[in-house]
Amino acid sequence: MRITSVRLVSVAALAWLCTAGCAVNPVTGRQELALFSVSPSQEIQLGKEAFPKAVQQMGGEYADKQLAGYVNSVGLRVARVSERPELPYEFRVLNDSTPNAFALPGGYIAITRGLLASLENEAQLAAVLGHEVGHVTARDSVQGMQRGTLLNVGLAVLSAATGSSAYGTAATQAGQLAAGLLDNRFSRDQERQADRLGVDYMVRAGYNPRGSIQLQEFFYRTVEGGAEPMWLTGLFRTHPFSKERMQDLQAYVAQRYPAQTADSRFVLNAQPFQRAIAGLKTTAKGYELYDKAREQEAQGDVSGAIATYLQAAAAAPDQSLILTGLGLAYLRAQDVRAARPHFARAVQLDDNYYLSRLGLGMVHLELNEIPAAVGHLQKSMDLLPTDRGGYLLATGYEKQGRTAQALELYEQIAKAYPQSSVGQAAARKVTEMRGK
């Protein structure tokens, strides 16, 4: 499992750089200044590499296949009438209470459980997803990369050698790209344009534009009523909202789509939406308690958090994320054996979330069950490379007598995370092993 290093800007990447170059915006047709040229296929590659890491960073997918299929069908209905219907659109529901939605280059779009629970009908959902499709069609994330610090990371991902270790440099850079794109803040002009594009798409798809107005009015009431921290750290942080933005959209709909708002052929679809989120509502109390437990942990009240996690698990049984939170709290309380069954059940329910695998790997490592530990830690690193996961996996290799692999991974962690306590511990291990 050799870890392949990737130069930040390879010869191939340099070929994409252009001096004072321009790119054509697919929506407006205008030429825009571009520091480096990204073709549609490269744009798709960026999203394809970053999207799985972004999903992991935001709690993994919410385990409701019916809801996932419903949201994807609404998203595709809207995307297929956009200016770029040929993109390989994917729409996912993320297991995160923070109300949010995001779009990565190439058509990779997600909405959180927290935002879905705040909506009332399918037209509002179409407005949210249409807005995100608008960011994709206008290539707003790519433009953000041009202006920000993601230029080199994006080039590295595009030029990364295929076939490298799933938790080597290339995967780490994909994770960095995902984090940077998730943190990307759109300008007011980009938000206004995405609002209008979202309305255009939803109307073409047969939805009533009143859904978009309802959504904006709900956002306005939320802001005026004193938005909760989850809104401020989620949707309103990356998608800035204002009264002027709401009024602009109201005027746009009134001017362009007055007939459609009163036409029964353009639907709101409240009942299908409510049926689709029925399962999500049954878990709402459990996740409310889960969020409370996380706050208690952050304040240092581990025993109180464990009690609340147990209440959450009782209110919403067999929710992998809640069980993972409970397992991690038991680990913080240094009760490894109590943590074990919760991690095991979490992985049984969802074996594709990095934190559940990481937790179970830590348990096996503590109990000196090394082969099992290595298996889960490898899977955790495949899903999302982290400094802790890498350090623990290197420890597992070392305990198995795989000294060369352990040393190589310790070196990678030390190099990638020189400022973190884990990275510094890895550097000490490198010194110790080379001194033997």
Image (cartoon, grey):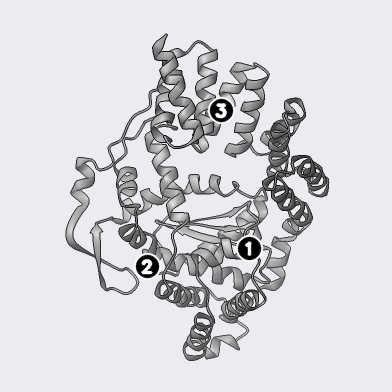
Amino acid type, residue under disc 3 in the picture: Leu
Looking at the figure, which quarter contains the C terminus? top left
**First-in-chain label (3 vs 1):** 1
Tell us which disc is closer to us: 2 or 3. Answer: 3
In the rendered image, residue 220, in percent from the top left (x then y), is placed at 60, 78
When the figure is inspected, residue 207 is found, relative to residue 374, above or below; the finding is below
Residues packed near mark 1 inside 10 Å, few (<14), some (14 to 19) or many (20 plus): few
- Disc number at residue 271? none
At horizontal 74% and vertical 52% (from top left) the residue drawn is 292
Looking at the figure, which quarter contains the N terminus? top left
Position of 80 compared to 321: left or right?
left
Residues packed near mark 3 inside 10 Å, few (<14), some (14 to 19) or many (20 plus): many
Position of 254 compared to 64: left or right?
left
Question: Count of labels shown?
Answer: 3
Whether residues under marks 3 and 1 lie with C-beta atoms below 8 angstroms apart, the answer is no
At horizontal 52% and vertical 37% (from top left) the residue drawn is 383
Q: CA distance from mark 3 to mark 1?
A: 33 Å
In the rendered image, residue 389, in percent from the top left (x then y), is placed at 53, 31
At horizontal 71% and vertical 38% (from top left) the residue drawn is 329
At horizontal 60% and vertical 72% (from top left) the residue drawn is 124
Q: Mark 1 highlights which residue? A: 229
- Disc number at residue 377? 3
When the figure is inspected, residue 399 is found, relative to residue 353, above or below; the finding is above
Q: Mark 2 highlights which residue? A: 138
Q: CA distance from mark 1 to mark 2?
A: 29 Å
Residues packed near mark 2 inside 10 Å, few (<14), some (14 to 19) or many (20 plus): many
Specify the farthest residue to the top: 436
Which sits in the foreground, 64 or 191? 191
Quarter of the rendering containing residue 135: bottom left
Q: Element at badge 1?
A: helix
In the rendered image, residue 184, in percent from the top left (x then y), is placed at 44, 59
Amino acid type, residue under disc 2 in the picture: Ala
